């Protein structure tokens, strides 16, 4: 693939120096504003207006140069188009090659222009974040809202790249036509998937993909997986990821995700019956289900750390532990021991490899396939969630073999043990461990990219007027030191406490929202068998069908939100609306009538579950954008934090169900719903306070 290397970047920055954002000027302005406000010499409102005016000037400079360059490209393409038309009549292969090379030259110039837009967009984001951090209020939200939505917006030219797509289309179509010397007359517009395989087109497509902030279903699902992207990835790092990529290994990684979700939910419909068969109360099902989550709190950390060195070894260990755990779960019936049952579920939790599943996609899948892999990760989780209860519905039998009992409560354990045994063989034979050499190369590539970013930022930051006084240079040196410190701070965090310190108030609220929705969902799912048996006398198969139907709503709901809703509403609006709907679903679930009806339970459960699914996708999508880039890598990454928050919520929810059982079955539903309602109301209040910072 053609790459826009460091030397070319440096050359371009020098050539177009006067048209880049004057980063150093803006930094100096921010510092002066801080000093003026500290001595109460300036009104904050006047500061915002003055800084807005300066930014408007900088953006206007960028946009006018961008339009000038686009016009030049359009002029050249128009001339080449006339030559192309005459060439069609002559069918001259030599002239076709020359014209193809001319189009490639235009494409390379377009690649330079895309880099110019990308660097300015990054510089603008950095200075906006710096302003917000120094002043403590959301200037970014005010500036973007007032400028981006204006009919004469120039900011949209920088962040939405208006007009560039048309140039890309013209170049792609003509290169495709010239590469087809036999004249089959197949247009790229008739078959969008058949883009020319020319390396420069691949480079342009990769650059455009980095720039565009798409909201289609695939990207929405990818963000749902919460695999945090770096702000700017290098071509060298992408090359390393290409070397590490192995399709069958990725499939096995996704299969692990699917099987683990099946393993989690296959026992939910029968957990209360199992506990009663072993002489315990039905509400002990909360402990049975929750013990897996308790172990997962710890397994997420050590698997995340282990994945720094290897992928196949922790996956093999995880599979063996899950095989043992499910076997113990199934044997507990014949041993008549609730303790063996709980130990089995603890082993299942200790085998949770979801941290590895996310990490593998982040590290070993090429950037151009990473979003698809992330979407597949979400789909595999959703299908596993639906297939678990559905599979439990099919295991309604009772027989003995080799003195072992196979019935509706033990078969989930036996089936999953057999599934993990098969998976173990496939993993051992077909999984390809990424080489350590490639890991070292990836680390080197990341260090190289960081040094390139430093050069780019410093180059863009060079002032337009070179004859600055020395006092001004001394004044800037303090900022340069702070920028170097900031660059140093991009290294991965080394502890949970360090990761926690990086969380802003809005990120903390969003993690609390994630805790809330997981708590509400766990209460709904884990106590479903107990509640429906008590109020409606449902059998295990009916409970399984009900839970499977809930699980099947996940993908359609995400399609609706990702393809339609997110295109007409802001994500923060969807976030707040989803929280309110979860709250309403919980309210409607309370037993305030006698008798408690099936329509009330089913409708309220559906509202709660669907709203929580929408909320989860939007919440993680927002988190993937606003969380610190330091949390995109290393052991204590953003994915681990969100996993820990969700797992802790499940543990507390399952414990709540068991404790509520002491007040009797008649009060179980209302007692377990009260904490859900209180937590949901708190999350809505937190969202309202941080609403303006969610952008």
Image (cartoon, grey):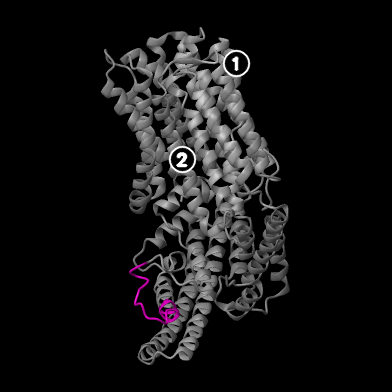
Q: Is residue 337 visible?
A: no
**What count of labels does the image hold?**
2
Q: Nearer the viewer, residue 404 or 10?
A: 404
User: Which secondary structure is most common in the magenta stretch?
Assistant: loop
Residue depicted at 60% across the width and 59% down the height? 242
Report the Cα–Cα distance between label 2 and label 1: 47 Å
Q: Is residue 182 magenta?
A: yes
Task: Label 1, secondary structure: give it.
Answer: helix
Q: Residue furthest top?
A: 279
From this viewpoint, which residue is outermost toward the front?
402
Residue at 57% of width from left, 54% of height from top? Answer: 365
* Residue of label 1: 340
Q: Position of residue 123 (x, y in %)?
A: 57, 64
Circle 2 sits in a helix, a strand or a loop, which is it? helix
Question: Left or right: 651 with respect to 72?
Answer: right
Residue mark closest to the camera, 2 vs 1: 1
* Tag of residue 689: 2
What segment is highlighted magenta in the picture? 174-191
Q: Is residue 101 above or below residue 267?
A: below
Q: Nearer the viewer, residue 563 or 133?
A: 563
């Amino acid at each position: 693939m053609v790459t826009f290397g460091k030397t070319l970047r440096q050359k371009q920055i020098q050539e177009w120096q006067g048209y880049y954002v004057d980063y150093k000027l803006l930094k100096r302005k921010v510092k002066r504003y801080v000093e003026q406000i500290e001595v109460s010499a300036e009104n904050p409102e006047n500061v915002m207006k003055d800084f807005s005016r300066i930014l408007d000037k900088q953006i206007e400079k960028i946009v006018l140069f961008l339009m000038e360059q686009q016009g030049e490209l359009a002029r050249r393409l128009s001339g080449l188009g006339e030559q192309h038309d005459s060439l069609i009549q002559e069918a001259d292969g030599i002239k076709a090659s020359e014209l193809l090379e001319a189009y490639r030259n235009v494409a390379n110039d377009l690649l330079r222009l895309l880099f110019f837009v990308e660097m300015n967009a990054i510089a603008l984001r950095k200075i906006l974040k710096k302003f917000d951090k120094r002043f403590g209020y959301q200037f970014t939200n005010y500036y973007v809202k007032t400028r981006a939505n204006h009919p004469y917006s120039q900011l949209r030219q920088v962040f939405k790249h208006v007009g560039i797509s048309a140039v890309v289309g013209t170049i792609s179509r003509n290169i495709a036509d010239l590469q087809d010397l036999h004249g089959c007359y197949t247009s790229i517009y008739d078959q969008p998937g058949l883009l020319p395989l020319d390396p420069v087109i691949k480079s342009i497509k990769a650059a455009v993909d980095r720039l565009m902030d798409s909201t289609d279903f695939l990207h929405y699902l990818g963000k749902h997986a919460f695999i945090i992207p770096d702000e700017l990835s290098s071509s060298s790092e992408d090359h390393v990821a290409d070397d590490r990529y192995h399709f069958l290994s990725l499939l096995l990684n996704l299969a692990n995700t699917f099987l683990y979700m099946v393993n989690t939910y296959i026992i939910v419909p029968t957990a209360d019956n199992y506990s009663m068969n072993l002489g315990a109360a039905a509400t002990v099902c909360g402990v049975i289900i929750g013990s897996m989550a308790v172990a997962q709190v710890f397994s997420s950390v050590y698997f995340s750390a282990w994945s720094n060195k290897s992928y196949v070894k922790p996956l093999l260990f995880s599979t063996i532990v899950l095989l043992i755990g499910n076997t113990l779960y199934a044997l507990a019936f014949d041993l008549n021991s609730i303790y063996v049952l709980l130990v089995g579920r603890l082993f299942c939790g200790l085998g949770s490899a979801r941290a590895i599943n996310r990490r593998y996609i982040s590290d070993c899948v090429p950037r151009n396939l990473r979003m698809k892999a992330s979407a597949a990760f979400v789909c595999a989780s959703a299908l596993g969630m639906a297939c678990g209860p559905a599979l439990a519905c099919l295991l309604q039998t009772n027989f003995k073999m080799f003195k072992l009992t196979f019935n509706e409560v033990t078969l989930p354990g036996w089936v999953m043990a057999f599934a993990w045994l098969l998976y173990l063989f496939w993993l051992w034979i077909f999984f390809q461990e990424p080489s350590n050499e490639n890991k070292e190369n990836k680390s080197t590539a990341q260090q190289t990219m960081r040094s390139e970013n430093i050069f780019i930022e410093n180059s863009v930051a060079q002032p337009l007027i070179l004859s600055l006084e020395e006092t001004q240079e001394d004044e800037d040196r303090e900022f340069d030191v702070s920028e170097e410190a900031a660059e140093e701070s991009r290294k991965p965090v080394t502890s949970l406490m360090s990761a926690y310190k990086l969380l802003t108030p809005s990120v903390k609220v969003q993690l609390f929202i994630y805790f809330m929705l997981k708590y509400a969902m766990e209460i709904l799912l884990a106590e479903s068998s107990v509640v429906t048996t008590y109020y409606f006398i449902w059998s295990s198969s009916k409970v399984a069908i009900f839970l499977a139907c809930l699980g099947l709503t996940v993908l359609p709901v995400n399609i609706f939100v990702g393809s339609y809703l997110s295109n007409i509403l802001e994500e923060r609006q969807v976030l707040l609306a989803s929280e309110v709907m979860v709250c309403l679903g919980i309210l409607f679930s309370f037993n305030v009538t006698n008798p408690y009806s099936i329509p009330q339970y089913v409708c309220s459960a559906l509202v709660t579950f669907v709203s929580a699914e929408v909320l989860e996708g939007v919440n993680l999508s927002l988190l993937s954008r606003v969380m610190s880039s330091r949390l995109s890598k290393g052991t204590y990454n953003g994915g681990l934090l969100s996993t820990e928050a969700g797992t802790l919520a499940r543990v507390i929810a399952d414990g709540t169900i068991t404790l509520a059982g002491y007040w009797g079955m008649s009060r179980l539903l209302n007692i377990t719903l009260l904490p859900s309602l209180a937590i949901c109301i708190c999350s809505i209040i937190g969202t309202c306070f941080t609403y303006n910072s969610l952008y």
